[in-house]
Amino acid sequence: MAVSKKVVLRFPRRMVERPIIYRLAKDYDLEFNILKASITPEQEGLLVLELKGNQAEYDRGIEFLLKAGVQIQSLSQDITRNEERCTQCGACVTVCPTGAFKLDPKTQLVIFNNEKCIGCGLCIPACPPHAMEVHF
Ligand code: SF4
Ligand code: SF4
């Protein structure tokens, strides 16, 4: 069975140079699309990936990542915006890897499309008035 999933990988900076994503493609035949890659202020490597491939290979690839010391973040979190707190500053627009925030050119309001959200949590520290909330 074929799968297509979005995952957030976090790993220590010492691993940033290791070709873990290359191994996913080569050893597990997974197609990948890097939605976001950065080093966090805590010096962690952070990757938001879309992975496609055979379910069994996907499971083996995830196991490989976990054994290599990579943290795989659950994407089942429910992220909401507290509309009363949002100041429409737009800081979240460039941070979100999936384009869940859009600036409406007519109203100049930042629209949040919850359906595009994969729950990576990147917008939470990026929002100055703490309008983005995570529910577990
Ligand atoms: S958690 Fe925030 S940054 Fe991540 S996908 Fe959802 S809206 Fe975008
Ligand atoms: S960063 Fe926060 S306050 Fe600014 S537009 Fe986005 S949700 Fe609203």
Image (cartoon, helix red, strand yellow):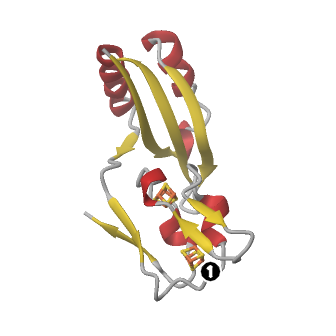
Residue beneath the point at 52% across and 43% down? 48
* Residue 8 or residue 50, whichever sits in front: 50
* Residue 111 or residue 62, whichever sits in front: 111
Residue 63: image x %, image y %?
31, 26
Q: Give the left or right position of residue 55, taking residue 18 as reference.
A: left
Instruction: Tell me the amino acid under the disc marked 1.
Output: Gln
Quadrant in which the N terminus appears: top left
Q: Quadrant of residue 119?
A: bottom left
Q: Is residue 13 above or below residue 90?
A: above
Furthest-right residue in this view: 105
Tag 1 secondary structure: loop
Residue 30: image x %, image y %?
47, 18
Quadrant in which the C terminus appears: bottom left
Residue 16: image x %, image y %?
58, 38
Q: Give the left or right position of residue 104, taking residue 130 as reference.
A: right
Q: Is residue 65 above or below residue 30?
A: below
* Residue 20 or residue 80, whichever sits in front: 80
Residue beneath the point at 35% across and 48% down? 75
Residue 34: image x %, image y %?
59, 36
Residue beneath the point at 47% across and 79% down? 131
Q: Is mark 1 within 8 Å of ligand 2?
A: yes
Q: Is residue 48 above or below residue 96?
A: above
**Disc 1 designates what residue?**
88
